[in-house]
Image (cartoon, grey):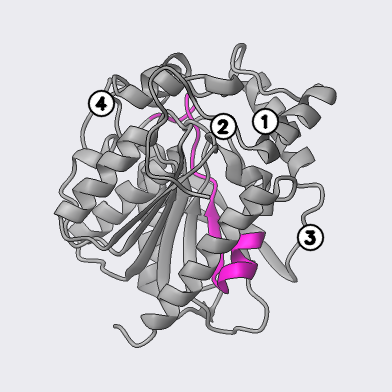
Amino acid sequence: MSRSENPSPDSCPPVHPDLLAVATSLRQQGLLPIVQGDVQSVRGQLERINAWAAHRSVPLSYERTLGFCVDGRTVPCKLYWPEGDETPCLMFYCHGGGFRHGSLAGWDAPLRQLVRDSGLAVLSIDYALSPEHRFPVAFNEVVAIVSRVIKLGAITDCPVRGYALGGDSAGANLALGAAIALRDVGINALRQLLLFYGSYSRDMTSNSWQRLGGYAGQNLSVETMSAYWASYLADDEDDWRVQPITADLTDLPPTRLVIGELDPLLDENRGLAQRLKDAGVVTSLQVLANMTHGFIRFNEVAPIARNVLAAQGNALRKALSNQANLP
């Protein structure tokens, strides 16, 4: 399922048939993603796509919406609890969407599966979206909520026995940045990072950006990513909170990176993996053959996405079980 080689410059591998089948179904129902137009229209179409993709998803026995007040804004969060474990580990999760799209409901399906496969509880953070709220609002919200829960040692009065942090795409950027910020203030409770196809740099000159931007109908291109950055940043900031790949990466928890070989973010994910290893961080990079950007939301309708999530969930279960006796 995974391969280490880049596609050749003049010929890209085909998209995985499961993802092609999803694209065909979306097209038949008039649900192709849109990138042009006002932000609300794009968000609305994304929510319709997510609702279709998640229509088979079965809720967990315990799911609860919470609110955390950060800098005067109530940040909605959703807690997913595993069956049969009163004191599980807890993963904080930041959804993708280019810093300006995405919602709690839109990630129900993959996070429910992740809870079932990993045995972790998950707290999904509905951080502030741009352009209504620009950097560093979302970053500050994620850091504040994660640090608050860790200091309490519990969530909704239920104790937890360890912590992980994850995210996809823009959410992976926020998750990695939050892990760095927590380390810098001496909070070292995170035991694992799980980052799907993250955007960690504003540099879009890499080979993978040039070859794979917009490939096979993907909406992630240099043009759209530039628009996301312009929407997110108020003053063209470029410090490590925006580009966490440039930060000091020492003393971070073991990190799992997952990226498709047809994702324009491939090269920077490879670059991040190398920088983490150079910093002494236990790092796993999985490059998935024939996979494009943004696939985890389709876990209920694309078996390959479901299999990837299952593998990562099982890996988390094993890793956190092995770390059970760590402080």
Could you tell me which secondary element the residue under label 4 belongs to?
Answer: loop
Q: Is residue 167 above or below residue 24?
A: below
Question: In the rendered structure, which disc, 3 or 2, sits on the residue that comes first in sequence?
Answer: 3
For residue 58, the mark is 3
Kindly identify which residue carries mark 1: 46
Q: Which residues are magenta?
A: 113-134
3 and 1 marks in contact (CB < 8 Å) = no
> Quick one: label 3, few (<14), some, or many (20+) residues within 10 Å?
few
SS of the residue under disc 3: loop
Name the residue carrying label 4.
237
Near mark 1 (Cα within 10 A), the count class, few <14, some 14-19 or many ≥20, is many
Residue that badge 2 annotates: 101
Q: Amino acid at mark 3?
A: Val
Q: Badge 2, how many Cα within 10 Å: few under 14, some, many 20+?
A: many
Say left or right for 104 vs 241: right
| Secondary structure found at label 2 | loop
Q: Estimate the spatial distance between the alpha carbons at disc 3 and disc 4, rounded to whole Å.
A: 41 Å
Near mark 4 (Cα within 10 A), the count class, few <14, some 14-19 or many ≥20, is some
Mark 1 touches mark 2? (CB < 8 Å): yes
What type is the residue that disc 4 sits on?
Glu
Residue 139 lies, in percent from the top left, at 36, 43
- Measure how far apart labels 4 and 1 are at the Cα level: 27 Å
Identify the amino acid type marked 1. Answer: Leu
Q: Is residue 240 left or right of residue 148?
A: left
Sequence-first disc among 3 and 4 = 3
Does the magenta-highlighted stretch encompass residue 126?
A: yes
Q: Position of residue 11 (x, y in %)?
A: 47, 21
Q: Nearer the viewer, mark 3 or mark 4?
A: 3
Q: Residue at x 22, y 52 (%)?
A: 276
Q: Quadrant of residue 62?
A: bottom right
